[in-house]
Image: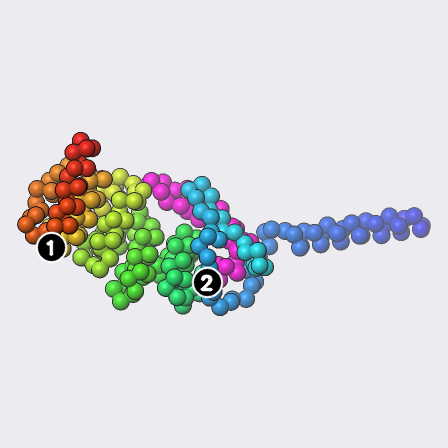
Amino acid sequence: MRKFNQVNFVFIILIVFIFGWLFFYNPGLPTSLIPRIKPTPIKQDEINFNNKERIYHQSQQGNGTIAPVRENYFGSGFNNQMTILVDTNKLYQLVGNLSFGTIDDQIDAIILLSKIGTLEQKKIIENYAINSNQKIPIRIAAAENIDWEQSTPTVVNLLSANDTISEAMIYMASTKDLSIQTRNIIDEAIYSAFFQWPKISTQIAILNYFLEQNHSQFDYLITKIALNEYSTDQKEQVIDLIKQRKENS
């Protein structure tokens, strides 16, 4: 009987151990029961993103939970789902900074939440780009980091409106990895803007864009400029663009 009780005791201890291990170490259990904290600056160098993997590294001094997040990454016209590991303490800071941080904090939050944020947070970022009353650095950061494939109508409206940030967006457009369909839409919007905007610096930005994206459009538009209206520096910029075109022909 004593031996039987000993066996039962060992068996009970084993069961308790197994259930305890599953409860405390199961990664599938909720990890969001963390109190909200006030916005604090987040250093950009704490983030490490690349095209294959995006991981938010936990701060050495923090005790936030590392929680997996799924994201659809749009690039070159296709969807690529990936897993992102997020320090939830830092994530709460980002969310607070998006609305209430300093300009630098807001820009950092825009850059990161445009990639890992919720649809609602991404919509806030898109609205920042649209809002003409928003501070210019925040608008530019928002315009650069929204998904140009998913927000093409917004991008086209900003490019076509002779908006304060439109010229900056023309330079951004050359750096974007877009599907052929979206690239054609952007090309058309920028081409039309050349004849709608009298601002010479904007026309030079458009010439720069088509020198990289569409040589035939560049060759046509270069014949439509009035160099006599350009300053000496602006004439030199145009001459340099023409030289580059000849070198690439």
Q: Which mark is residue 41?
A: 2
Measured as percent of width and height from the top left, residue 189 is found at 19, 48
Q: Amino acid at mark 1?
A: Pro
Q: Is residue 163 left or right of residue 45?
A: left
Position above or below: 78 against 91: above
Q: Residue at x 92, y 48 (%)?
A: 3
Q: Amino acid at mark 2?
A: Pro
Residue 196 in view of the camera: no
In the picture as drawn, the residue positioned furthest to the right comes out as: 1
Q: Quadrant of residue 140?
A: bottom left
How dense is the environment of label 1, judged by Cα within 10 Å: few (below 14), some, or many (20 and up)?
few
Q: Is residue 85 left or right of residue 215?
A: right
Residue 137 in view of the camera: yes
Q: Which mark is residue 224?
A: none
What is the number of callouts on the image? Answer: 2
Q: Residue at x 44, y 65 (%)?
A: 96
Indicate which disc, 2 or 1, sits on the residue closer to the N terminus.
Answer: 2
Q: Which mark is residue 198?
A: 1
Q: Residue at x 47, y 48 (%)?
A: 48
Measured as percent of width and height from the top left, residue 62 is found at 57, 59
Q: Residue at x 44, y 54 (%)?
A: 44
Magenta stretch in the rendered image: 66-93
Q: Main secondary structure of the magenta part?
A: strand
Q: Quadrant of residue 23?
A: bottom right
Q: Does 92 appear in magenta? A: yes
Q: Does 108 appear in magenta? A: no
Q: Secondary structure at mark 1?
A: loop
Q: Secondary structure at mark 2?
A: loop
Measured as percent of width and height from the top left, residue 147 is found at 33, 50
Q: Is residue 37 left or right of residue 168?
A: right
Measured as percent of width and height from the top left, residue 156 is found at 23, 52
